[in-house]
């Protein structure tokens, strides 16, 4: 099943950050990031309250130096389902 919302995922040294053309979310932990995703999607009005939304977070490899990308297994993509 395809994700309904996609974010580029990065870390700024303090927080996980997810962004796309419509939304910006952040959190110090993955749980706080998921909580912010729920909040932002609820506030958007694009999905009814109580619905389950599949969210894909693809790590933004452009945020790390080219020479370091060979170690990309240390980074990840993430697929979560959040209930609004």
Image (tube, helix red, strand yellow):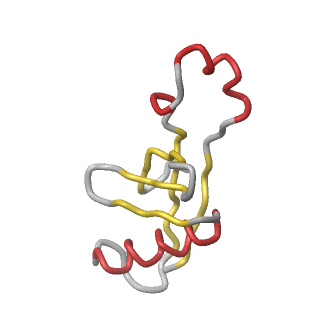
Residue at image coords 64%, 63%: 30
Residue extending furthest toward the bottom:
49
x, y percent for residue 45:
28, 78
Give left or right: position of 71 versus 10: right
> On the image, which quarter does residue 72 sit in?
top right
Give left or right: position of 77 versus 22: right
**Nearer to me, 10 or 50:** 10
> On the image, which quarter does residue 23 sit in?
bottom left
x, y percent for residue 69:
61, 20
Rendered position, 73 above or below 78: above
x, y percent for residue 37:
47, 68
Rendered position, 50 above or below 34: below
Rendered position, 28 above or below 13: below
Q: How many marks?
A: 0
**Nearer to me, 15 or 4:** 15
Residue at image coords 41%, 55%: 5
Residue at image coords 71%, 22%: 71
């Amino acid at each position: 099943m395809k994700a309904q919302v996609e974010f580029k995922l990065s870390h700024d040294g303090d927080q996980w950050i997810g962004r796309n053309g419509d939304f910006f979310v952040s959190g110090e932990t993955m749980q706080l990031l998921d909580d912010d995703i729920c909040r932002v999607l609820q506030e958007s009005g694009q999905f009814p309250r109580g619905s389950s939304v599949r969210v894909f977070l693809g790590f933004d490899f452009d945020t790390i130096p080219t020479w370091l990308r060979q170690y990309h297994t240390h980074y990840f993509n993430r697929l979560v389902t959040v209930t609004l």
